[in-house]
Structure formats: C-alpha cells, structure tokens
Amino acid sequence: MKVSRIFSRRNRAVGVLWVAGFLAGTVIVVGCGGGSSSSMPMNAVGTVTVTISDPPSCKKPNGSFEHVYVTVRSVQAHIDPHADDSSSGWQELAPQLGNQPMQIDLFSPAQTNCVLAQLGSASLPVGSYQQIRLLLVSNNPSAGSPVPAANACAANGFNCAVLSDGSIHELELSSQANTGLKIPPGQIVGGPIQVVAGQSVDLNIDFNACASIVQQGNGKFRLKPTLTAGQVSPNNSGIGGQVVDSVTKAPIVGSVLVAVEQPDTRGIDRIVMEASADGNGNFRFCPLPAGPFDVVIVAVGPNNLPYNATAVMNVPNGTNLSAIPLVAETGATSPAVLQGFVTASGASSGPTADVSLAALQTITFGTNPLITRDLTIPLESIQATATTQPIFSTGLISVESNANCPTGSPANANCAPYTLVVPGSNPSVGVFSASGFGYAGPVSGDVLFTVDAIAAVPASGGTPNCSPSEMMTSKDANNQPLRVTAAVTTNVARIDFTGCS
C-alpha cells in the first residue's frame, strides 16, 4: 500500500436510531452526562431505540479491508445547531452504553431490518434536534473506564482495521472521537429530527467506514469519520433492484457498486449511502430518509471489463427498481484511471490537510425543465492480473509531506498523490416513473470528468481547512479538458490549496 492513501469507496456505512412505542405515566429524562434527571409529563417526551449499520463496499476484493471495528460508548442529540462539545443540553440516547460499551464490526453482515446491532434505548424530550454525535471508547482508556468484555482489536486499542492479510492496525482517533463525532445540520438529510409528544421517530445514522480511514505517511491508520443522518420511516422498504448486463440480462460477475445520492444546494449529487451488490446483482438500501434519491451504479466485470455508470433519477423510497441494465465498454481491458497531486500551503511552513476526493460527471435529464446535475461516480478498483498490480481508488488522502512533490509545486507546500478509478464512458440515464421508464444510452463523444477536493484539519473530526476548503478542476495536466479513456491513465491538473493550517 502506498503512503498517504485511504483505500475507500464513498460507501456510506449506515446506522439507525429507532424511536418506538408510546409512553405511559412519567419518564426520566437522561442528560448527556448521565447525572441529574427529572420527572416530566408523558406529553413532553418520547422513547428512542438506537441501532447502527453499514453495508461495506471497500471490503476485499474492492479494497484492502476485511473488518473495521469501532467501540461506541454514547450516542447523543442536541436541539441547538451551534452547540459545541462543552455545551449543556446534549441528550443521551443510549445510556446503557455508559457501563457496557459496544464494539461493532462495521463490515459484518446485517442482522435484521438492515441493522448490525441495537445499541440501546432511552427517553427523549420533544423538540427539533439539529445535531447528533457518537462518542467512542479511547484506544487508551483510563484505569477503571468501562470497556467491552471482548476486544477484537487485541493489543491495538479498541478501534481498529483488519487488512486482507489478517494484520490488525489501530485506528488513531481525532480529539472529536472522544468528545463526539458530530453530525451537524448540513449532514442531516431532510432537515432536523422532529420528536413529537407521544409519537415515534426513526433516525438513520450512516457511519461511512470506507470513506473514513486514512493511511498516514508513517504507515499508521487514522479515523476521519464521515457521518450522515436522516429521519426514516419503518413503513418504507427502502430502495432495491438487480444489476444486470444489458445484453445477456444476467447478473454481472465481478465488482458492482451502488450509491444512493441526493443533490446539495449547488446541484451536485452527494452520496448518502453506498454498497456492493451481491453475487446475484441484488442490492437493497434500508431504512432510508425521505426521498427521492438518485441511484448511481458502476461495475467492473471479469478480466477487468468496465461498464458505463448508470443513473436512475428521482427514485422514491419504497421502490424496487427490478432489473437495471449496465452497458459494457466492449473491447476495453480495464476502467479509466485519473491520477493527480494535491498540495497544501499556508502562512507557516509545511501545513497539513486531510483531503476527500470525488469524481463527478455531468448529466442532463427531464424535459420542461431540462435539469443539469453533477453525479458523484462511485470509485472503482482494478484487480491484479498475471502481469499487473491491483489499482485501488484513494478517496481520502493525507497531505503531510513535501517528499516527491511534482515540479512547479508551491514553495514550502506539502503534497500527496491520489488515484481515482472510473468508467471510461458517459453514463446511461433513466428517470423514474411509476408507469415505467427506460434508459438513454451513454452519450457518444468526449468522456469528461471533474475532480472535487475538500480539505479538513487533520485529527479534527472534519473541521474545514484551507481557504477555500473545497476546490474543483476539470482540466488535465496540460490544461485541456479532463477527458478519460478506458484502460488509459490521465494526469489531472494539480490542485493547490492555500491558507491551510
């Protein structure tokens, strides 16, 4: 594995908070510290049950991980969107974890209803909850601190990654891993979580493990959590379907990645969840926040045969998309590869940054009006052959060294390389309709991409870094449009962040 890489997919790992049942009599409201409590009338509270899940897409052979373990000691919610780590008013959703922390393998199969494990339950005052946070057990807890009875990380802390070779590596935690991995208002899909007196609320937490692990220059692994949440309904069955070859109508043998996405305020589709289809091409996302969603699929078949990305737009929750045909890039021997460098400079010498990378393709769909949207294309991998090494996408990199910076890099800047494996063709697009719909085949001509980079302060839990903290490029290293071709590596124009800490 290369220095400064994360082998990730932009899969989101999924967790779910179930608020169930109705209340009788009075209940006890539990504060974040587990200290004082007070008796409140029935109509002032609700009951919450917390679960967590994650459908991995970077597990071998799509990545180098076999297991990712995190140990959760608390789940909390706050009404104030500006509340910080030390603010009062954080409400504990799973008080049972205080004495019995739970270690969870984010890559283990789901149990029932798409969840990995139930974390606990508690009463919750009514209100509009703007923030959620998870607290993890420290890798070096103080004497007497509660820890899980069994520890799959052995002597490597309580949060770790197990690679495909069986080696166990501690996941170094940011300060926010102990004070709270926050899901701020902008990352709660559909807006604040509304807890109404005497009613149930279901909240889905997505812990995207595959986009949350960065390998540092010293070879150690660090957790940079990527979390989202959204209010969901247990009455909706989520979104499912089967991915098939457009010619044979048979499931695609190989790696099939499926993402559900929603547009941000700028019209860029951001991944909400991501998973691998099973051996029969089937996938299912559940439970989901309120839709609609855009479903984006990529695949690499036998002998690294690439398929074009296929998108189904405006899919409601509770939909079975049935067979979704993907078009093979006939004659291609592997997907396209984008390679580039990110640099970080600032007032001080050698600033550092964690940078998340995405590959975007622009599509148009609909009539009256015609809609233009940038899709986030799930990042692929190329499997090893008798004569070539595997190539994994690096969706998250650590910019922390000035070694091997490319010629022309800014003075006193650190740098890091990245690799994105993507389809070598334009997407097929369909627009969901309950009465039936078809797919417009891949548009001929240039296959154009944009690389999106977002910088964060290392070990901060995601605090924005640099000015601006997000940069995009649609140019190659020769300042020409960023065109790709299957089985060809294209060098991307260098992305230079400034004002970094």
Image (cartoon, helix red, strand yellow):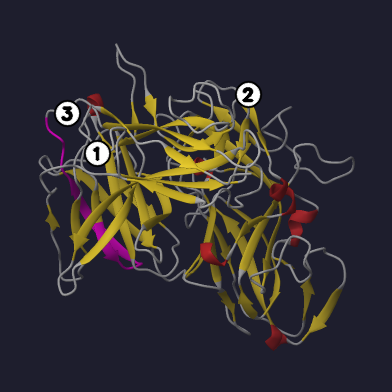
Say which residue appears at 85% left-offset and 45% top-offset: 145
Instruction: Give the alpha-carbon distance from disc 1 to disc 2, as whole Å.
Output: 35 Å
Type of the residue with mark 1: Gln
Circle 2: is it few (<14), some (14-19), or many (20+) Cα within 10 Å?
few
Closest to the observer, 423 or 138: 423
| Of the image marks 1 and 2, the number of the one nearer the N terminus | 2
Which residue has dot 1 on it? 480
In the rendered image, residue 284, in percent from the top left (x then y), is placed at 36, 53
The stretch in magenta equals: 312-330
> Marks 1 and 3: which is nearer the front?
1
Which residue has dot 2 on it? 218
Q: Quadrant of residue 169?
A: top right
In the rendered image, residue 310, in percent from the top left (x then y), is placed at 23, 49
Identify the main secondary structure in magenta: strand
Question: In this view, which residue lies farthest toward the top?
Answer: 387
> Marks 1 and 2: which is nearer the front?
1
In the rendered image, residue 117, in percent from the top left (x then y), is placed at 59, 52
Eyeballing the image, is 74 above or below 22? above
Circle 1: is it few (<14), some (14-19), or many (20+) Cα within 10 Å?
few
Given contact means CB atoms under 8 Å apart, are the residues at marks 1 and 2 in contact?
no
Closest to the observer, 405 or 373: 405
| Of the image marks 1 and 3, the number of the one nearer the N terminus | 3
| Of the image marks 3 and 2, the number of the one nearer the N terminus | 2
Type of the residue with mark 2: Asn
